[in-house]
Image: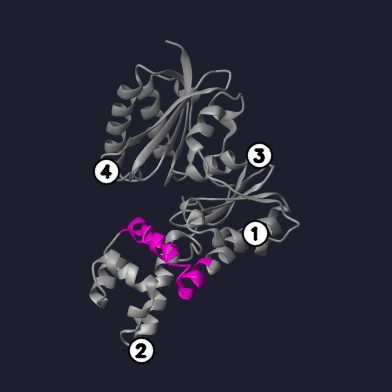
Amino acid sequence: MSRQVLGLDVGGTAIRWATATMDGLVVDEGLFPLSQKNHISTQSGQDQFAISLGKLAIELESKALPIAVLAGITGLRAHAPTQLFLRQSLSQCFSAPIESVRVCNDLVLGALDAWEPGQGHLVYAGTGSVAAHVDASMRLHRVGGLGHLLDDAGGGYWIAKEAFRLIWRQEDEAPGRWSGSPMACRLFEAIGGATWKHTLDAVYDTSRGSLGQLAVHVAATADQDAMAMDILRAAGAELARLAGVLTHRLGPAPVVLAGGASHLHPEIFRVFKEQIGQATPCSHRRLEPHRRAALWAVRPDFRNIPLFAAEGEVPATAL
């Protein structure tokens, strides 16, 4: 069996993996669901994560024996015991030397998937929103990523929250007005009813990710509902703001917009591009960080990949 490298993109509910040869050719990839939501910050979460890694290792045993592993992990913080645990678990499960195992926050992996270090900016809109740049010295700089309670404007959670906020403001002014809004009708159908209790349960008694998934209904009705379209245009403008702030801090560079929320409707990217301006090259892409992780794992400089953010910055949580 040939010795290969392994790239992992560890999300909240699944691990995307890819293997590559030492000459930089991706040879296999797949999706491995986690048995329960990834909470690596807790002891029980770490125990479950180790079990999941063991199962994944068994699944991949006939495919590859990695000599190096690079894993981008959502929620990873600058906490030395957690980092050590993750590196030890990956080393043990995949029989790779621990000195050849590297972990980083998934934002780092996304930024490296979008650009070579120092070459461009990334704006990512998933459930939350964040902008990132890995500079030529392999330092990650980020803008946004403050979480749904503080900001995350332009992400899926924000889009869904804005929709409910506007719907219920209109209901305060004219009860029953929701029935004339395609967006409200579709959202209320999705949450099981049009009462205030149904909205309370959907917004306050559910996960951030579950609420963010309702943004798809806003996008689906935008061509028939001016209120929905206004929300998506506002999302595009908010995401463009992140790119503008990063450009102000680090200088002009090409920009990639990525993430599931950014692909909900073409109007989001249209406004994003318009707000950024014609002078800045801009593209809209779907990232594949698990493949990029595998390709980085064969590079001699892969051990220089930063854990998450430049010294003194707050770790990002948006992806």
Q: Earlier in the sequence, mark 1 or mark 4?
A: 4
Name of the residue lying farthest toward the front: 224
Q: CA distance from mark 1 to mark 4?
A: 38 Å
Q: Is residue 25 above or below residue 105?
A: above
Q: Is residue 29 above or below residue 196?
A: above
In the rendered structure, which amino acid carries the disc numbered 1? Lys
Q: Which residue position holds label 2?
A: 174
In the rendered structure, which amino acid carries the disc numbered 3? Pro
Q: Earlier in the sequence, mark 4 or mark 2?
A: 4
Q: Is residue 288 above or below residue 181?
A: above
Q: From the image, give the main secondary structure of the stretch colored magenta.
A: helix
Question: Cβ–Cβ below 8 Å for labels 1 and 4?
Answer: no
Name of the residue lying farthest toward the top: 1
In front: mark 1 or mark 3?
Answer: 1
Where are the magenta residues, as a range? 207-232
Q: Which mark is residue 117?
A: 3
Q: Can residue 236 be seen by looking at this rendering?
A: yes
Q: Does 79 appear in magenta?
A: no
Quarter of the rendering occupied by the N terminus: top left
Q: CA distance from mark 4 to mark 2?
A: 43 Å
Q: Which residue position holds label 4?
A: 36
Q: CA distance from mark 1 to mark 2?
A: 36 Å
Q: CA distance from mark 2 to mark 3?
A: 53 Å
Q: Nearer the viewer, residue 301 or 189?
A: 189
Q: Which residue position holds label 1?
A: 273
